[in-house]
Amino acid sequence: MSKNYFFISDVHLGLQNEQTEKIKEKRLVEFISFASLNCDELFILGDLFDYWFEYKRVIQKGYFKTFSALKEMTEKGVRVKYLIGNHDFMHRDFFEKEIGAELKEDAFSIVLNEKKFFLGHGDGLVKNDNGYKILKKILRNKTFQKMYSVIHPDLGIALASKTSKTSRDYTAEKDYGESDGLFEAACGKIDEGFDYVILGHTHKRRNEKYKNGYYINLGSWLNKPCYGKFNGNIFEIIDW
Ligand SMILES: [Mn+2]
């Protein structure tokens, strides 16, 4: 029997003002509860948080309800795979140890209902983005992260938040129109034999057929809450 798989990306928790964040988190938590009852596995494809910097003994506050909803989900036996994005990459073991989610550092392939999926956030796939690729290497470097973690959490998290906003402006300034390169990258994956390529990052919803495969961009929960659903027959993006 076919299973139900849900996908979300680019929630960017922590980006907006307190009031907006409260509403956003409430809707997200309602979705997670719904997903707990209606899917077999949830894939979070990056940028769940607008910034994430986890210390060895300290995590950010403000997302308690999200943490506990996800924890309840995994306790029910529903699997959660969380692929980190370009905004929420400084993880340690909190999500695996305390929440029971499986953390993925990079894009990965997986077979779901006998279809081959390539799941990624989408950063680093954009063509001619060498500046970003270098930055990514530095930011993901464990020694760099260790050095950064010497900074007091109150300051370190504030800095991460500020840098994240600058990084978003940097990304937003780029033209992610028809030439974002992700469609072409997805076609390459389909040529390699994938049936579905699911990405986020650009915040632009797409559902394109190429040969016998599909390129799906989940858009962003931030701009319009929605989730991807795959039941074995079709992949659809549903507004929440
Ligand atoms: Mn992103």
Image: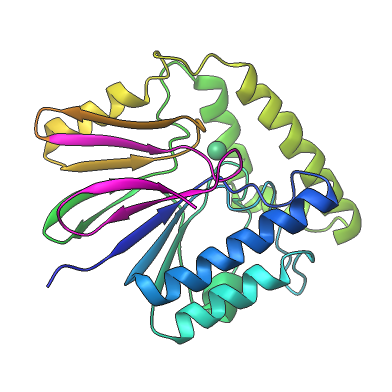
Q: Residue at x 56, y 27 (%)?
A: 132
With respect to residue 10, does 178 lie above or below?
Answer: above
Residue 36 on the magenta segment: no
Residue appearing at x 64%, y 47% in the figure: 12
Quadrant of the image containing the N terminus: bottom left
Q: Where on the image, by quarter, is ligand 1?
A: top right
Q: Residue, x 72% and y 56% (percent of image)?
A: 23
**Is residue 66 toward the left or the right of residue 83 in the image?**
right
Q: Write down the region rendered in magenta.
A: 213-240
How are the colours assigned in the image? rainbow
**Is 57 drawn above or below residue 90 in the view shown?**
below
Q: Please state the horizontal and vertical placement of residue 191, each as a whole percent of the image.
A: 13, 30
From the viewer's side, name the closer residue of 34 and 163.
34
Q: Nearer the viewer, residue 51 or 231?
A: 231
Whether 136 is drawn above or below 130: the answer is below
Position of 14 with respect to 237 (left or right) is: right
